[in-house]
Image (cartoon, coloured by chain):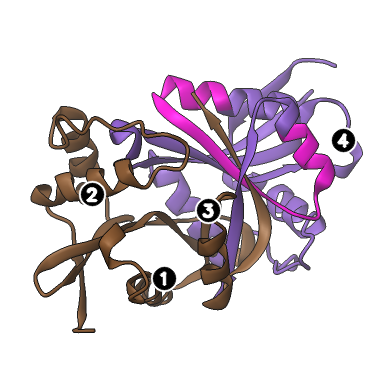
Chain colours: A brown, B purple
Amino acid sequence: MSDLVIRNAVLADLPFIVGLIDADNVGGSTEDMSDPQGPAYRAAFDTISADPNQLLLIAELEGAPVGTFQLTFTPGIARKGGWRCTIEGVHVAPDRRNQRIGEKMMDWAVEAARARGCSLVQLTSNKQRTDAHRFYERIGFSKSHEGFKLSL
Amino acid sequence: MSDLVIRNAVLADLPFIVGLIDADNVGGSTEDMSDPQGPAYRAAFDTISADPNQLLLIAELEGAPVGTFQLTFTPGIARKGGWRCTIEGVHVAPDRRNQRIGEKMMDWAVEAARARGCSLVQLTSNKQRTDAHRFYERIGFSKSHEGFKLSL
C-alpha cells in the first residue's frame, strides 16, 4: 500500500465524511445526505475546527480520502489529573477495507494521544461490530467496559 | 431524603473527589492521596473550570458533598452535526449508597445534556460493576456498545 496520509479535514470533506457515517451506521442512518454541507453539518465542522481539543481527521491514499475519525482530548481528575483521548467516528470507505487503513489510523491516534500527554485512549464500538472488536483488541485495547448510550 | 443540590466543584472539593476516585477504582488506584490538591490535580481542575464544554460537579446533601461526576460536551458530525454529552467519573460516597443519589445525579446530567441541545448522552462502566449496569439500564440507557480502553 502506498503511504497513507493523515490530515485535518477541510469543509470540502464533509460529503465524504457524512457519506461514510450514513453508509456505516448499524443503528439506522440519522444523516441528511441531501445536504451534507448544510448549516447543521457546517456549524459542527466549524465548532470542531475552532476547538484545540478536537481533531477531525481524514486518511488519504494517493490524494483520495479513504477514512475518517475524530479525536477529543478531555481533561479529568482521575489518574493524577490525566488527560484522556476519545476516538469517535472511525470509518473506512467500504471499498478500502482490509488494507490496514484502520490500523494506521488508530496508530496515528494513539501517537497523537501520547504526544499530547494523555494517560488513556478510549473508544466505544457497537456490540454488533464484532470484527471491529477483534481488531481493537489485536492493536492493544482492552474490552474492559460496557458502553451505554441514551438518545435524546 | 432532603433535597440534593448539584453544584459546580470548587478547588476545596478536590480532596473529596480524589478520595472517592481512589476508594472506588476497580482497576486499582492510580491516585496520589498524599496531595489531592497538588499541582497535577490543580492544573486539571483549572483546565476543566476554564472550558465551557466541561462541567465538574458535586452532589451535596445538607451542606456535605456526597457525590461527583463530570460532563463533557462534544461536537461531532454524526446525527446531523449533533452534540454528545459524555458522563465520566461518576462516584457516590460509600456511606451514601442506595439513597438514589446516583439517580438524581444522572437525571441532572440528562437534563443538562438536553438543555445544551445534545442528541446523545453516553458513558462507559467497567464490566465488573454489574450493579451500576442494571442501574443505567433502569434509567433508560442502552448497553449497546463495548467500551475499549488503552492505558498509555
**Residue A120 location (% of width, % of height):** 54, 67
**Residue A145 location (% of width, % of height):** 67, 55
Mark 2 to mark 1: distance in Å? Answer: 22 Å
Q: Residues at badges 3 and 1 in contact (C-beta under 8 Å)? A: no
Res. A113 mark: 1
Tell me, yes or no, whether the highlighted magenta stretch contains residue B116. yes
Residue beneath the point at 13% across and 37% down: A37
Q: The disc labelled 4 sits on which kind of residue?
A: Arg
Q: Residues at badges 4 and 3 in contact (C-beta under 8 Å)? A: no
Res. B97 mark: 4
**Residue B66 location (% of width, % of height):** 78, 35
Secondary structure of the residue carrying tag 2 is: helix
Above or below, B127 against B68 in this view is below
Residue beneath the point at 58% across and 61% down: B148
Q: The disc labelled 3 sits on which kind of residue?
A: Ser
Name the quarter where the N terminus of chain A is drawn. Answer: bottom left
Mark 2 to mark 4: distance in Å? Answer: 44 Å
Residue position marked by numbered label 3 in the rendering: A125
